Image: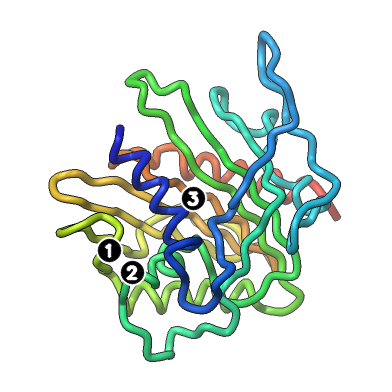
Amino acid sequence: MVLRWSVAVVSVCMVTACGSPTADTAGEIPSTAQATGSATATKPASPTVPATGGPGYSATLSARLLTMDSVPAGFTVEIATVMSADAGDRRPSVDVSCSHSMIPLLSATRLTGTPSAMAAATLSYDADPVGWGWVGNEVLRTYTDDGARRAMADLRAFIGRCPTVASSGQGAGGSYRFSVAPGPRLGDDSIHVRCSSTSGSDALECDSVLIRIGTTLVIVQELGNRPGGDEHLTQLAEAALRKYQTTGS
Protein backbone atom coordinates (compact mmCIF):
# COMPACT_ATOMS: atom_id res chain seq x y z
CA MET A 1 0.00 0.00 0.00
CA VAL A 2 2.89 2.38 0.82
CA LEU A 3 4.44 1.70 -2.59
CA ARG A 4 1.12 2.26 -4.30
CA TRP A 5 0.66 5.73 -2.87
CA SER A 6 4.36 6.58 -3.31
CA VAL A 7 4.06 5.83 -7.02
CA ALA A 8 0.89 7.93 -7.23
CA VAL A 9 2.93 10.78 -5.73
CA VAL A 10 5.75 10.09 -8.19
CA SER A 11 3.18 10.29 -10.99
CA VAL A 12 2.53 13.88 -9.92
CA CYS A 13 6.19 14.66 -9.30
CA MET A 14 7.38 13.44 -12.66
CA VAL A 15 5.36 16.11 -14.43
CA THR A 16 5.65 18.91 -11.90
CA ALA A 17 8.69 19.28 -9.66
CA CYS A 18 10.64 16.62 -11.53
CA GLY A 19 10.50 18.61 -14.77
CA SER A 20 9.41 17.76 -18.29
CA PRO A 21 10.88 17.60 -21.81
CA THR A 22 9.52 20.95 -22.89
CA ALA A 23 7.92 23.07 -20.21
CA ASP A 24 8.72 24.14 -16.64
CA THR A 25 5.02 24.65 -15.86
CA ALA A 26 3.82 21.17 -16.76
CA GLY A 27 1.72 19.39 -14.16
CA GLU A 28 -0.27 16.26 -13.59
CA ILE A 29 -3.71 16.43 -15.16
CA PRO A 30 -5.62 17.10 -13.01
CA SER A 31 -3.05 18.97 -10.88
CA THR A 32 -5.75 20.02 -8.43
CA ALA A 33 -9.33 18.89 -8.07
CA GLN A 34 -12.36 20.38 -6.40
CA ALA A 35 -15.47 18.47 -5.40
CA THR A 36 -18.40 20.75 -4.73
CA GLY A 37 -21.08 18.08 -4.48
CA SER A 38 -22.07 16.54 -1.14
CA ALA A 39 -22.64 12.92 -0.22
CA THR A 40 -26.09 11.61 0.60
CA ALA A 41 -27.14 8.56 2.50
CA THR A 42 -27.76 6.67 -0.72
CA LYS A 43 -25.48 7.93 -3.46
CA PRO A 44 -23.07 10.89 -3.57
CA ALA A 45 -24.20 13.77 -5.73
CA SER A 46 -22.24 14.64 -8.85
CA PRO A 47 -19.88 17.57 -8.31
CA THR A 48 -21.03 20.92 -9.65
CA VAL A 49 -18.97 22.10 -12.64
CA PRO A 50 -17.04 25.21 -11.51
CA ALA A 51 -17.78 28.25 -13.68
CA THR A 52 -14.14 29.29 -13.91
CA GLY A 53 -10.69 27.82 -13.47
CA GLY A 54 -7.07 28.25 -14.44
CA PRO A 55 -5.59 28.59 -17.95
CA GLY A 56 -6.93 25.92 -20.31
CA TYR A 57 -9.93 25.09 -18.12
CA SER A 58 -13.25 24.83 -19.95
CA ALA A 59 -16.50 24.72 -17.99
CA THR A 60 -18.36 23.70 -21.16
CA LEU A 61 -16.05 20.74 -21.75
CA SER A 62 -16.03 19.85 -18.05
CA ALA A 63 -19.80 19.39 -18.27
CA ARG A 64 -19.09 16.45 -20.62
CA LEU A 65 -16.93 14.59 -18.08
CA LEU A 66 -18.19 11.52 -16.27
CA THR A 67 -20.58 12.23 -13.41
CA MET A 68 -21.80 10.18 -10.47
CA ASP A 69 -24.78 9.15 -12.61
CA SER A 70 -22.54 7.83 -15.41
CA VAL A 71 -19.88 5.91 -13.48
CA PRO A 72 -20.26 2.42 -12.00
CA ALA A 73 -21.38 2.11 -8.39
CA GLY A 74 -18.60 2.73 -5.89
CA PHE A 75 -16.82 5.44 -7.90
CA THR A 76 -16.53 9.11 -7.01
CA VAL A 77 -15.71 12.01 -9.35
CA GLU A 78 -13.80 15.21 -8.52
CA ILE A 79 -13.62 17.87 -11.24
CA ALA A 80 -10.32 19.70 -11.69
CA THR A 81 -10.06 23.41 -12.39
CA VAL A 82 -6.29 23.60 -12.97
CA MET A 83 -4.96 22.19 -16.24
CA SER A 84 -1.34 21.65 -17.22
CA ALA A 85 0.30 22.55 -20.51
CA ASP A 86 0.92 19.73 -22.98
CA ALA A 87 4.22 19.18 -24.74
CA GLY A 88 3.70 21.52 -27.67
CA ASP A 89 5.86 20.86 -30.70
CA ARG A 90 7.93 18.06 -29.14
CA ARG A 91 8.16 15.43 -31.88
CA PRO A 92 9.21 11.75 -31.75
CA SER A 93 11.96 12.41 -34.30
CA VAL A 94 13.78 14.81 -31.94
CA ASP A 95 16.96 13.22 -30.63
CA VAL A 96 16.02 12.92 -26.95
CA SER A 97 17.33 10.16 -24.72
CA CYS A 98 14.90 7.67 -23.20
CA SER A 99 15.31 9.21 -19.77
CA HIS A 100 13.10 9.75 -16.72
CA SER A 101 11.91 13.08 -18.16
CA MET A 102 10.21 11.15 -20.98
CA ILE A 103 7.83 9.29 -18.65
CA PRO A 104 4.98 11.87 -18.82
CA LEU A 105 4.93 11.61 -22.63
CA LEU A 106 5.28 7.83 -22.71
CA SER A 107 2.52 7.32 -20.14
CA ALA A 108 0.13 9.75 -21.93
CA THR A 109 0.03 11.99 -18.87
CA ARG A 110 1.17 14.68 -21.30
CA LEU A 111 0.82 14.65 -25.08
CA THR A 112 2.32 16.54 -27.98
CA GLY A 113 0.41 19.46 -29.43
CA THR A 114 -1.62 22.23 -27.84
CA PRO A 115 -5.32 21.61 -27.09
CA SER A 116 -7.77 24.46 -27.58
CA ALA A 117 -9.69 23.40 -24.46
CA MET A 118 -9.31 20.83 -21.70
CA ALA A 119 -11.25 19.24 -18.86
CA ALA A 120 -10.20 16.72 -16.24
CA ALA A 121 -11.45 14.84 -13.21
CA THR A 122 -10.10 12.42 -10.64
CA LEU A 123 -11.90 9.07 -10.52
CA SER A 124 -11.62 6.96 -7.39
CA TYR A 125 -13.07 3.65 -6.27
CA ASP A 126 -13.00 2.66 -2.61
CA ALA A 127 -15.26 -0.40 -2.64
CA ASP A 128 -12.53 -2.97 -3.35
CA PRO A 129 -13.16 -6.02 -1.13
CA VAL A 130 -9.44 -6.32 -0.30
CA GLY A 131 -9.20 -2.66 0.62
CA TRP A 132 -6.83 -1.64 -2.17
CA GLY A 133 -9.02 0.89 -3.96
CA TRP A 134 -8.44 2.37 -7.42
CA VAL A 135 -7.53 5.88 -8.52
CA GLY A 136 -7.30 7.39 -11.98
CA ASN A 137 -8.05 10.39 -14.19
CA GLU A 138 -10.40 11.26 -17.00
CA VAL A 139 -9.07 13.92 -19.37
CA LEU A 140 -10.78 15.56 -22.35
CA ARG A 141 -8.69 17.46 -24.91
CA THR A 142 -10.14 19.27 -27.91
CA TYR A 143 -8.17 20.70 -30.83
CA THR A 144 -8.89 23.20 -33.59
CA ASP A 145 -6.92 21.15 -36.13
CA ASP A 146 -5.82 17.51 -36.48
CA GLY A 147 -3.88 17.71 -33.21
CA ALA A 148 -5.76 14.74 -31.72
CA ARG A 149 -4.67 12.48 -34.57
CA ARG A 150 -1.06 13.72 -34.40
CA ALA A 151 -0.91 13.30 -30.63
CA MET A 152 -1.90 9.62 -30.89
CA ALA A 153 0.56 9.00 -33.74
CA ASP A 154 3.34 10.65 -31.75
CA LEU A 155 2.49 8.60 -28.66
CA ARG A 156 2.76 5.34 -30.61
CA ALA A 157 6.11 6.49 -32.03
CA PHE A 158 7.47 7.49 -28.61
CA ILE A 159 6.55 4.12 -27.10
CA GLY A 160 8.16 2.31 -30.02
CA ARG A 161 11.39 4.22 -29.42
CA CYS A 162 11.45 4.14 -25.61
CA PRO A 163 9.73 1.00 -24.29
CA THR A 164 11.78 0.99 -21.05
CA VAL A 165 12.91 3.94 -18.92
CA ALA A 166 14.90 3.88 -15.71
CA SER A 167 13.13 5.76 -12.94
CA SER A 168 15.30 8.11 -10.92
CA GLY A 169 12.43 8.53 -8.51
CA GLN A 170 12.28 4.90 -7.34
CA GLY A 171 15.90 4.33 -6.44
CA ALA A 172 18.22 1.61 -7.69
CA GLY A 173 16.55 -0.92 -9.94
CA GLY A 174 13.37 1.10 -10.49
CA SER A 175 12.01 1.26 -14.03
CA TYR A 176 8.93 1.95 -16.16
CA ARG A 177 7.88 -0.21 -19.10
CA PHE A 178 5.54 0.92 -21.88
CA SER A 179 3.79 -0.87 -24.72
CA VAL A 180 0.72 -0.66 -26.92
CA ALA A 181 -1.54 -3.41 -25.61
CA PRO A 182 -4.67 -5.03 -27.01
CA GLY A 183 -7.72 -3.01 -26.08
CA PRO A 184 -11.22 -2.01 -27.08
CA ARG A 185 -11.79 -0.43 -30.50
CA LEU A 186 -13.62 2.78 -29.71
CA GLY A 187 -14.35 6.00 -31.55
CA ASP A 188 -12.43 6.88 -34.70
CA ASP A 189 -9.21 5.49 -33.19
CA SER A 190 -8.19 4.13 -29.82
CA ILE A 191 -5.08 2.92 -28.07
CA HIS A 192 -4.43 1.05 -24.82
CA VAL A 193 -1.10 2.12 -23.34
CA ARG A 194 0.31 -0.53 -21.03
CA CYS A 195 2.43 1.12 -18.34
CA SER A 196 4.07 -0.67 -15.43
CA SER A 197 6.55 0.45 -12.81
CA THR A 198 8.83 -1.80 -10.78
CA SER A 199 11.03 -1.29 -7.75
CA GLY A 200 12.71 -4.45 -6.52
CA SER A 201 10.03 -7.13 -6.31
CA ASP A 202 7.15 -4.63 -6.23
CA ALA A 203 5.14 -3.74 -9.33
CA LEU A 204 2.37 -1.27 -10.09
CA GLU A 205 0.44 -0.35 -13.22
CA CYS A 206 -0.47 3.02 -14.74
CA ASP A 207 -2.36 2.07 -17.91
CA SER A 208 -4.29 4.48 -20.12
CA VAL A 209 -6.98 4.19 -22.79
CA LEU A 210 -7.04 7.02 -25.34
CA ILE A 211 -9.99 7.44 -27.71
CA ARG A 212 -10.08 9.87 -30.61
CA ILE A 213 -13.49 11.05 -31.74
CA GLY A 214 -13.14 13.71 -34.41
CA THR A 215 -10.90 16.46 -33.04
CA THR A 216 -11.28 15.37 -29.41
CA LEU A 217 -9.33 12.93 -27.24
CA VAL A 218 -11.17 11.12 -24.45
CA ILE A 219 -8.64 9.61 -22.04
CA VAL A 220 -8.93 7.47 -18.93
CA GLN A 221 -5.77 6.75 -16.94
CA GLU A 222 -5.07 4.63 -13.89
CA LEU A 223 -2.44 5.81 -11.42
CA GLY A 224 -0.34 3.41 -9.38
CA ASN A 225 -2.72 0.47 -9.12
CA ARG A 226 -1.94 -3.18 -8.49
CA PRO A 227 -1.11 -5.49 -11.42
CA GLY A 228 -4.35 -6.71 -12.94
CA GLY A 229 -6.17 -3.72 -11.47
CA ASP A 230 -7.08 -2.35 -14.89
CA GLU A 231 -10.41 -4.20 -14.90
CA HIS A 232 -12.06 -0.80 -14.39
CA LEU A 233 -10.17 0.91 -17.21
CA THR A 234 -12.16 -0.31 -20.23
CA GLN A 235 -15.48 0.08 -18.41
CA LEU A 236 -14.67 3.69 -17.51
CA ALA A 237 -13.33 4.48 -20.99
CA GLU A 238 -16.53 3.22 -22.61
CA ALA A 239 -18.61 5.19 -20.12
CA ALA A 240 -16.53 8.34 -20.74
CA LEU A 241 -17.01 8.02 -24.49
CA ARG A 242 -20.78 7.55 -24.11
CA LYS A 243 -21.00 10.59 -21.83
CA TYR A 244 -19.02 12.75 -24.27
CA GLN A 245 -21.07 11.60 -27.25
CA THR A 246 -24.43 12.18 -25.58
CA THR A 247 -23.69 15.65 -24.20
CA GLY A 248 -22.77 18.94 -25.83
CA SER A 249 -23.29 19.83 -29.46
Amino acid type, residue under disc 1 in the picture: Ser
* Residue corresponding to mark 3: 221
**Alpha-carbon distance for marks 3 and 1?**
22 Å
Point out which mark residue 204 bears: none
Tell which tag, 3 or 2, sits nearer the viewer.
Answer: 2
Q: For the residue labelled by badge 2, is the local secondary structure a helix, a strand or a loop?
A: helix
| Residue annotated with mark 2 | 100
Mark 3 vs 1: CB contact within 8 A = no
Position in image of residue 135 (x %, y %): 47, 38
User: Where is residue 230 drawn, in percent x and y?
Assistant: 39, 42
Question: Could you tell me how far apart the alpha carbons at marks 1 and 2 are, in whole angstroms?
Answer: 6 Å
Tell me the residue at 28%/53% (across/down).
Answer: 197
- Residue 87, image x, y percentages: 56, 75
Q: Amino acid at mark 3?
A: Gln
List the residue tagged with mark 1.
Answer: 168
Residue located 45% across and 65% down the image: 104
Callout 3: helix, strand or loop? strand
Could you say where residue 145 lies in the image, as x and y percent from the top left? 72, 79
- Residue under the point 26% across and 55% down: 170
Type of the residue with mark 2: His
